Amino acid sequence: MKKILFLAIIFIALLSSCSSDTNENTNSSNLDITINISQPERKMDIYGKVVSQEWNEITLLQVDTSKDPTFNMTSEEKKKYMQSLPEESRKTLKEEINSAILWQIKIIIPVWIAMTKKEAQWSDAPNIEGSLADIQVWWYISVWLNQSIADQKIAEFVKISFIQ
């Protein structure tokens, strides 16, 4: 009887140690996983304002960034700059910005591609992993197209902005 009790205790001890080791390994491996999301080295292919989204097909108003003098400004900088201008200059600038919108374009964003978004709205906020669910109508996105597919506009990487 003592042998059976002794074997049962050893068996239970082995089972509990195996299960705790598995949990510890799982937890430590989860901590070690870091998602490395890096945007492509090249310049973005399309920058635009989201007009509509149906599943993973996004319709954008494509913006010609070379015609928008406020393109590199944060929303706060843009607001301050616009307020500092006289009324006539502000109207001219708004027309200039509106003329930078070229046309509507449809883009397919595969579910599995890398995306980033700002963690918060301020300009120095860090980028974090994003998803299709994070894309909002009237927000701006930057799109790097998959260069191996020439006949369709399929995204390779997307950067989501909060600017409205």
Image (cartoon, rainbow, N blue to C red):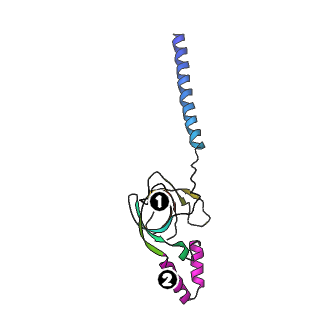
Q: Residue 117: x and y, percent?
A: 53, 60
**Cα distance between the residues tagged 2 and 1:** 30 Å
Residue 88 within the magenta-colored segment of the rendering: yes
Name of the residue lying farthest toward the left? 54
The image shows residue 127, relative to residue 12, as above or below, that is below
Q: Which residues are magenta?
A: 73-100
Q: Is residue 130 above or below residue 74?
A: above
Task: Tell me the chief SS of the magenta region.
Answer: helix
Residue 92 lies in the magenta-colored region:
yes
Q: Mark 1 — residue?
A: 134
Q: Is residue 33 above or below residue 164?
A: above
Horizontal and vertical percent for residue 72? 59, 71
Residue under numbered circle 2? 95
- Picture quarter containing residue 51? bottom left
Q: Identify the residue at image location x=57%, y=35%.
A: 25
109 or 43: nearer the eye?
43
Amino acid bearing label 1:
Asp
Name the residue at 44% across, 53% down: 111
Q: State the image coordinates of residue 81 (x, y, percent, origin top left).
A: 60, 80
Percent of width and height locating residue 84: 60, 84
